[in-house]
Amino acid sequence: MKAIPAIDLREGACVQLVGGAYDQERVRLPDPLDVARQWRAAGFTSLHVVDLDAATGRGANTTIIEQLVRGADVQVGGGVRDESAVERLLSLGAARVVVGTRGVEDPGWLESVTTAFPGKVVLAADVKGRAVVTRGWAATTSLDVVTLLERVRPLPLAGVLVTAVHLEGQLQGTDVGLFRDVVAASPFPIIASGGVTTADDLRALQTTGCHAAVIGMALYTGRLDAPAIAREFSS
């Protein structure tokens, strides 16, 4: 399993939010490019970039993303709701593009975009408990995450990013039971996110069969030893 640092962009800065709430910003670093350099220097080979402003309709961090994706394995998401946005990010150099809200709410569009870009689109399945949430985590659907995985099974997805929103940024551990269930239900690689606090959390996720884990708050607050984690979780 591979550990992937998160770089969440807000107003040009790299931030970490508790539970995705804009009024619960705990970390703010002014230079996301320097943050990316630090994670690469620590030994991480991939990055997970999210444009929080685009996801919530507050703007975009396009220029920074253009620089982050150059010559690196970077998956990018946040506010990607049309095929041209997917094409643009891939043309800039993104390895994969993460789609969330529209991918969940518009199955026909998801089929179209994954057919146009097979193996390049990751579906973000953000969940509270087992219920899928959309629109920057503000809207709770009636869709269970396992049902969603069954629905998208025929599509040529690169993977599914499952975020345990109920644990995001809280440094209270991750939802191992959730990830065990989604790995069992998914034909695609599962990327876990939300709540990772210790190396043992990552080891527990590894036992579920997760392909990768996105880590944020625990890295930014020093709860995890970045070089040690990069060494242990590198593939």
Image (tube, rainbow, N blue to C red):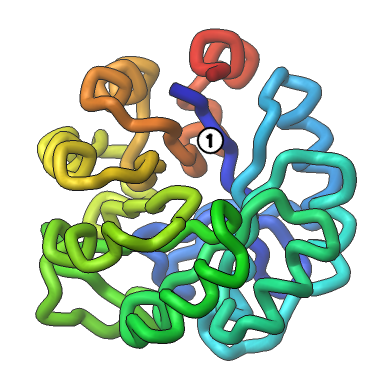
Between residue 233 and residue 166, name the one nearer to us.
233
- Identity of the residue drawn at 51% across and 63% down: 25
| Image: 131 above or below 122 | below
**Which corner quadrant of the image does residue 40 belong to?**
top right
Q: Residues within 10 Å of mark 1 (few under 14, many from 20)?
A: few
Note whether 195 is above or below 81 in the view shown: above
Q: Which residue is drawn at the image coordinates 58% and 77% (left, top)?
A: 80
Q: Nearer the viewer, residue 227 or 90?
A: 90
> Where residue 100 sits in the image (x, y, percent)?
43, 72
Q: Is residue 21 visible?
A: yes
Give 1 or 120, whichever is nearer the viewer: 120
Considering only vertical position in the picture, is 102 above or below 158?
Answer: below
Task: Provide residue 202's location: percent of width, then percent of height.
Answer: 35, 23
Helix, strand or loop at label 1? It is loop
Q: Quadrant of residue 175?
A: top left
Q: How many marks?
A: 1
Residue 99, above or below 198: below
Q: Is residue 119 left or right of residue 33?
A: left
The residue positioned 54% from the left and 60% from the top of the image is 121
Tell me the quadrant of the picture where the N terminus can be found.
top left
Q: Tell me: 24 left or right of 234.
A: left
Is residue 31 visible in the rendered structure shown here? Answer: no
Q: Amino acid at mark 1?
A: Thr
The quadrant of the picture occupied by the C terminus is top right
Q: Residue 111's spot in the image, x, y percent?
A: 42, 75
Closer-to-camera residue (203/32): 203
Where is residue 164 drawn, in percent x and y? Answer: 27, 52
Residue at (16, 35) in percent of width and height: 180
Instruction: Specify whether 89 is left or right of 80.
Output: right
Disc 1 designates what residue? 221
Apparent side of residue 151 relative to residue 15 in the rendered image (left or right) = left
Q: Which quadrant of the view contains residue 171? A: top left
